[in-house]
Image (cartoon, helix red, strand yellow):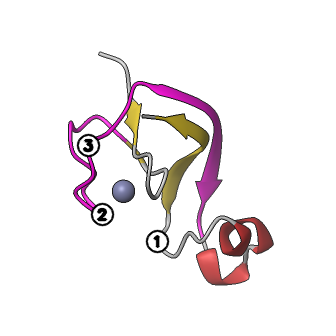
Amino acid sequence: MAEKACPRCRLITFNEQCPLCQTKTSEHWTGLIVVVNPDDSDLARELNITTPGRYALKVRE
Ligand SMILES: [Zn+2]
């Protein structure tokens, strides 16, 4: 089963629904970043990521 990503917050998950914001997830995503410490990461800040985890760079709904 392919992993999915949330179009709103870009979290990568196996769920049909994002566990963070309950948005329906999409199979169409590219790029992967791992955020360990959002407070210390400029990239996380730029992408508005506040929760540690794995995120897609681009998600199409
Ligand atoms: Zn989400």
Locate the C terminus and report the quarter of the image it occupies. Answer: top left
Q: Which amino acid does label 3 sit on?
A: Lys
What segment carries the magenta color?
A: 13-36
Considering every residue shown, the one lying at the far top of the view is 1
Query: As rendered, which of 53 and 43 lies closer to the eye?
Result: 43
Q: Is residue 11 shown left or right of residue 1?
A: right
Disc 3 residue: CB within 8 Å of ligand 1 = no
Give the distance between the C-alpha atoms of the residues marked 3 and 2, in whole angstroms: 11 Å
Residue at the image point whose x is 59% and y is 71% from the top: 48
Considering every residue shown, the one lying at the far front of the view is 61
Contact? badges 1 and 2 (CB < 8 Å): yes
Q: Is residue 33 above or below residue 46?
A: above
Q: Mark 1 points at which residue?
A: 51
Q: In this view, does 33 lie above or below 20?
A: above
Disc 2 residue: CB within 8 Å of ligand 1 = yes
Locate the N terminus and report the quarter of the image it occupies. Answer: top left
Q: What residue type is labelled 1?
A: Thr
Q: Which mark is residue 20?
A: 2
Q: Mark 3 points at which residue?
A: 24
Q: Where is residue 22 in the image (x, y as percent from the top left)?
A: 22, 57
Q: In this view, does 21 lie above or below 37?
A: above
Q: In which quarter of the image is residue 15?
A: top left
- Ligand 1 is found in which quarter of the picture? bottom left
Q: Where is residue 38 in the image (x, y as percent from the top left)?
A: 61, 75
Residue at the image point whose x is 73% and y is 70% from the top: 46
Residue at the image point whose x is 46% and y is 58% from the top: 9
